[in-house]
């Protein structure tokens, strides 16, 4: 089983940008944690980050046919990228949207996600732990676990 973990613009600056909002872990540290967690679950994790909307779309189009699910933090593209939304929807894969910060407790413009309506769920405000929760949830769903 393979999960794509996709990070959008400015997430390459994790560990350097506003640590009070985004935490002190770098993207490399986050990627390593996800790969380790994936190994423990028997899952192959493919990490990707781009500051370019087109780069994200190209990656999804190239790799989604060989994957079972997507975890994505679209960064600011969350709020306006209909082309990214279309690429994700076209993949036909289950998607979980993740945000390090609580986007609903920030600026008004951050409270709208164009990705959320096509995602299985959204995790917002749990820092790096949100990625782990998304991975465990997505893998559970793919393995047929039921909740509730």
Image (cartoon, helix red, strand yellow):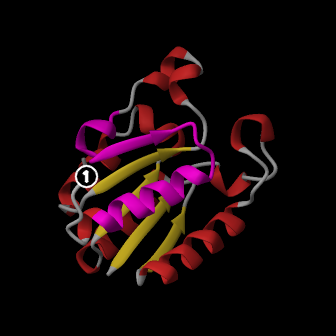
Residue 2 position (above or below residue 34): below
Span colored in magenta:
114-140
The reply to whether residue 92 is in sight is yes
* Nearer-the-camera pick, 125 or 144: 144
Residue 10: x %, y % from top left: 64, 48
Taking the spot 38% from the left edge, 72% from the top edge, the residue there is 3
Q: Is residue 141 above or below residue 46?
A: above
Q: Residue at x 30, y 39 (%)?
A: 82
- Name the residue tied to disc 1: 147
Nearer to us in this view, 15 or 54: 15
Residue 7 visible in rendering? no
Tag 1 secondary structure = loop
Horizontal side of residue 124 vs 148, given as left or right? right
Residue 30 quadrant: bottom right
- Say above or below: 79 vs 27: above
Is residue 119 on the magenta stretch? yes
- State which quadrant residue 37 falls in: bottom right
Classify 10 Å Cα crowding around label 1: few (below 14), some (14-19), many (20 and above): few
* Total numbered circles: 1
Residue occupying image coordinates x 28% and y 46%: 119
The image shows residue 71 at horizontal and vertical percentages of: 41, 58
Residue at image position (64%, 74%) is 32
Q: Is residue 115 magenta?
A: yes
Query: Image check: 74 left or right of 27?
Result: left
């Amino acid at each position: 089983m393979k999960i794509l973990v996709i990070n959008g613009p400015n997430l390459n600056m994790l560990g350097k940008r506003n640590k009070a909002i985004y935490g002190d872990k770098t993207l490399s540290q986050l990627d390593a944690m996800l790969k380790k967690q994936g190994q423990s679950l028997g899952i192959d994790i493919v990490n990707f980050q781009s500051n370019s909307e087109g780069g994200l779309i190209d990656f999804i189009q190239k790799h989604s046919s060989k994957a079972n699910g997507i975890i994505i933090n679209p960064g600011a593209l969350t709020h306006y990228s209909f082309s990214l939304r279309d690429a994700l929807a076209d993949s036909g894969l289950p998607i979980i949207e993740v945000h390090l910060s609580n986007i609903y407790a920030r600026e008004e413009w951050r409270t709208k996600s164009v990705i959320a309506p096509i995602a299985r769920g959204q995790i917002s405000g749990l820092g790096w732990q949100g990625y782990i929760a998304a991975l465990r949830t997505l893998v559970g769903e793919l393995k047929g676990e039921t909740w509730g």
